[in-house]
Amino acid sequence: MTNRDTASFRAATLDQPLALDSGRALAGVEIAYETYGTLNAARDNAVLVFHALTGDQFVASTHPVTGKPGWWERMVGPGRPIDTERYHVICANVLGSCMGSTGPASMAADGQRHAMRFPVITVRDMVRAQVALLDHLGIGVLHAVVGGSMGGMQALCFAANWPQRTARVLAVATTARHSAQNIAFHEVGRQAIMADPAWNGGDYYGGASPDKGLSVARMAAHITYLSEAGLTEKFGRRLQARGDGQPGAKSFGFDADFQVESYLRHQGISFTDRFDANSYLYITRAMDYFDLAEEAGGRLADAFAAAGNTRFCLVSFDTDWLYTTADMREVVHALNAVAAPVSFVELSAPYGHDSFLLDVPALDRVVRGFIG
Amino acid sequence: MTNRDTASFRAATLDQPLALDSGRALAGVEIAYETYGTLNAARDNAVLVFHALTGDQFVASTHPVTGKPGWWERMVGPGRPIDTERYHVICANVLGSCMGSTGPASMAADGQRHAMRFPVITVRDMVRAQVALLDHLGIGVLHAVVGGSMGGMQALCFAANWPQRTARVLAVATTARHSAQNIAFHEVGRQAIMADPAWNGGDYYGGASPDKGLSVARMAAHITYLSEAGLTEKFGRRLQARGDGQPGAKSFGFDADFQVESYLRHQGISFTDRFDANSYLYITRAMDYFDLAEEAGGRLADAFAAAGNTRFCLVSFDTDWLYTTADMREVVHALNAVAAPVSFVELSAPYGHDSFLLDVPALDRVVRGFIG
């Protein structure tokens, strides 16, 4: 928390209170964002990139807390598939997150943290805040909206609700609806956080954070981001090397004997350095609530009724068992029903859901071709 | 814990110390077991049924703690596929568990609970203890060994190590090796337990148990027992009915809005009434260590080198993503390599891994046909 709290983020304060799907409204919303490349005189070369559950606005620049490269530098930058020499790329931290945008860790009007007083938000609320950011920035119609995973949900949500604000929609490794299994995994994570006594009903700011619970939540989620085959290829049943440099052996104890155990523990622990547990609760809840068809009265095609002139590109990965090709085909069928121009491709990649972030040259080609 | 502690279980005390794979030995091991049907004069009609991770010896009789029917009453009983009018069925609580067999919650020689001083055990150790039980009971060669999930691991382990002690091996919904993904899910569960302050390094007996951690562990595991399609059919995105009898609505809070959330929470909480958290650590560890090929020097067929005259029946389920048909095929190929008589069937059932416990008439027929 400390690093995040002391980092300064570029942010816009929305002029108007943000009306939320819950019926509540949030005043003084701040949306932190980064931009790359130059907005042209016609103001029509902007690309809005949406981030995933635990992502942030640092899509193509160094993360100020971890010091790591931007999370999609392979895709966004000079000469990259989303070419910042041609496009003005905007990426905002979602509402409810913890990298400078208003969320449960932000100060409320009473000078105390929102914590669990923060309203439950939806994916549409996240997108609504970003549309307000576009208004603030004076950008009317985007060249494209782009996102993977929860970023893809935002892209589809944008298309459903603000189709006149973008010419193109690129959604990767995502779904129009969180399934029972998706909800179940998220619920495990939330229960792990709330089971941690340090969570303290969400009032832990200034004290010890529920790092153990958040770490377990991250571990459980992380398994869903990888394919079974990918885990086998990367780790199999290989044992950890011991401190003395000898090959690993079973300890007949509860240390991390297997490399996959050590990897998961590291994923869990390092996550707590950069993410707020309450934000994890709120954002997973928003994802679980996500169901574009339901918002449209039950029929997915109706969600896209006004998007018939928007160009769509949808991408799934054959080893992604979190948001599957079958999920994506439902979106394709809905778009076909409204005669929207849509291209769909299932790419073969061994990494499971995380493929959208990793070295999949075929994805680079698809994105470059679509963004143009 | 209270109910379990005060229940009295039928148990045998092993005469000899049990030599463990870790190199340690356990003296005074008690193995709790139940029997059904009558052992014939030739003592050759016994069937040993192995239970799964959280199972117990009450395969066909009421569970003394929960009051629920035996866990496999559809399969074991008079006139059932494993017919207790013909066979003498034995089912023992595995070493390391908590229903009367020696485990971490048992008293050590010093009058204190073993807790984490209990030695780390393997699936082979569990089977070794049950072979000692057979010796104790004066049963030489079994008509069959039978098990699903971890019970199937024990059946395969029995075949690999004591093939002369059984005529038949029936293994359902299981694997010869825990995969990286299998290990990963178990590690999440263990970390959830150990993250609970009430776990207290395993020394919680007589005080508050780490129920919250154990509950999260059970929730995570439970997802892996069900298929995505089964979860969708059973729960989908249906909301919980509210107390006033009105149809459910989103609460825009963190209560269990979705039925699948409520179901998982119930699974987690009710589990803590009947299971010991330390036992969960030890048994999952044993499963993660399980790799029959490794025990045989790396080649699975070598594990079955002495089992060429044993009859095998292997069953997988098409929706089981925990232990898949592909896992089972590896066992089939290994048995083919040693020319063991083996029949293998993949059954179609919607319930995922849990199919072996549920209403799948085709499984009943396969079991009845094989047991004879």
Image: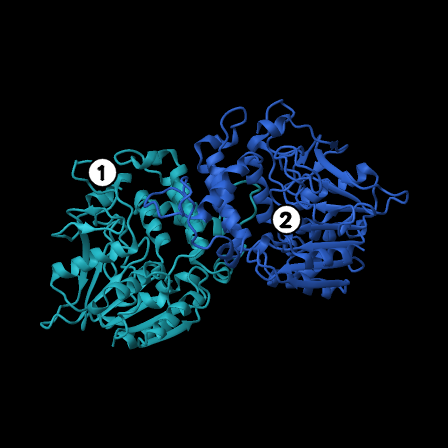
Chain colours: A cyan, B blue
Position of residue B286 relative to residue A238, above or below, is: above
The reply to whether callout 1 and callout 2 are in contact (CB within 8 Å) is no
Q: Quadrant of residue A326?
A: bottom left
Q: Quadrant of residue A198?
A: top left
Of residues A289 and B104, the one nearer the viewer is A289
Task: Residue B78: tell me if it is visible.
Answer: yes
Q: Is residue B108 left or right of residue A296?
A: right
- Crowding around mark 1 (Cα neighbors within 10 Å: few <14, some 14 to 19, many 20+) is some
Q: Residue furthest left?
A: A41
Residue under pointer 1: A113
User: Which mark, residue B118?
Assistant: none
User: Which mark, residue B150?
Assistant: 2
Provide residue A205's location: percent of width, then percent of height. 26, 36
Position of residue B278 relative to residue A178, above or below, is: above
Position of residue A136 relative to residue A343, above or below, is: above
Numbered marks: total: 2
Q: Residue furthest right?
A: B41
